[in-house]
Image (spheres, rainbow, N blue to C red):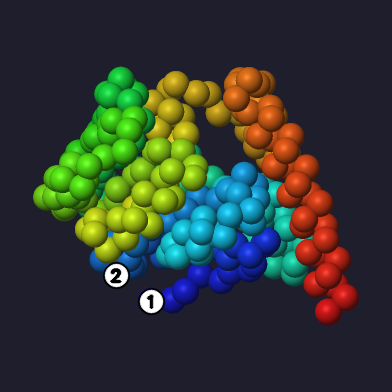
Amino acid sequence: MNRIQETSILGVNIAVTNIDEILKFLSENMKEVSGNYICVSNVHTTVLSYEDSDYKKVQNNALLRLPDGAPLSSVARKKGFNEAKRVTGPDLMQKIFESSDSNGYRHYFYGSTEETLKKLRDKLQEKYPNINIVGMYSPPFRTLTEEEDNEIIKNINNTEADIVWVGLGAPKQEIWMNNHKNKIKGLMIGVGAGFDYHAGNIKRAPKWMQKCSLEWLYRLLQDPKRLFKRYFRTNTKFIKLVHKELKNEKKS
């Protein structure tokens, strides 16, 4: 199995890649990567990893850490990886859904609410008539007992899903995937708000804003109460830390 090239950003090994390379990698290695997980990383998760060594281990223990946030691929290019592109969670989901029929992928969705999962199923079956959704589950908003967790693992594995989409939000979804590595039979991919995008709960930024790396601003305007503090603190800290890292790398 060929490995995807990576570069360290604040101690997190971010993939230097593009969406076509990821799709090819998955189609060629889906059986081999079963039981593993992929993190869709951004500024927030990278700063969180820098601040929390345990969470950094969770990130780096993944099969891949994809550069969902445009700043990550931008930093990779500044480090000399000119081919580095952004791979967003919603885009990855869409491309995999589009290729599911030809690849025979079986999908399981874990996370969000029952209402969102129903909307998601309806939207996906309407847009991709041949998509094979083998299961969905909205876990309770509390810590599960060991018995409950074992039952969930059993239920997911019984569906023989190729991909288990996990929508619990960061850092919860990455910790969940790490705790279930090699217990879940299938590739786990943590996509955060990806469920909401494809269910139609949240609109994505216009294409021009995505191309100009302004999708964060569009999301901020949609949910200012929740995101303002997070964006202001983590984005400011990320800029300072990366500037220092790049400066030190130039010296060495």
Q: Quadrant of the C terminus?
A: bottom right
Of 223 and 73, nearer the camera is 223
At numbered mark 2, what does the secondary structure look like: helix, strand or loop?
loop
Q: Is residue 84 above or below residue 139?
A: below
- Left of 28 or right of it: where is 31? left
Q: Using the rendered image of the protein, determine whether residue 132 is visible from the camera's viewpoint.
A: no
Amino acid on which the number 2 mark rests in the picture: Glu
Q: Using the rendered image of the protein, determine whether residue 135 is visible from the camera's viewpoint.
A: yes
Residue furthest bottom in the image: 252
Image position, residue 149 (x, y; %): 21, 46
Q: At 70% across and 42% down in the image, what residue appears?
A: 234
Separation of residues labelled 2 and 1 (CA atoms): 8 Å
Image position, residue 216 (x, y; %): 66, 34
Q: At 36% across and 53% down in the image, what residue appears?
A: 177
The dot on residue 103 is none
- Left of 208 or right of it: where is 150? left
Tell me the crowding category of disc 2: few under 14, some 14 to 19, or many 20 or more residues within 10 angstroms, Cα based.
Answer: few
Identify the residue position indicated by label 2 in the image: 32
- Left of 188 or right of it: where is 19? right
Identify the residue position indicated by label 1 in the image: 1
Tag 2 near tag 1, CB within 8 Å: yes
Of 27 and 8, nearer the camera is 8
Of 55 and 177, nearer the camera is 55
Image position, residue 1 (x, y; %): 38, 76
At numbered mark 1, what does the secondary structure look like: helix, strand or loop?
loop
Which label's residue is closer to the chain start, 2 or 1?
1
Tell me the crowding category of disc 1: few under 14, some 14 to 19, or many 20 or more residues within 10 angstroms, Cα based.
Answer: few
Image position, residue 141 (x, y; %): 34, 30
User: What is the quadrant of residue 245 in the picture?
Assistant: bottom right
Q: Is residue 79 above or below residue 152?
A: below
Amino acid on which the number 1 mark rests in the picture: Met
User: What is the quadrant of residue 144 in the picture?
Assistant: top left
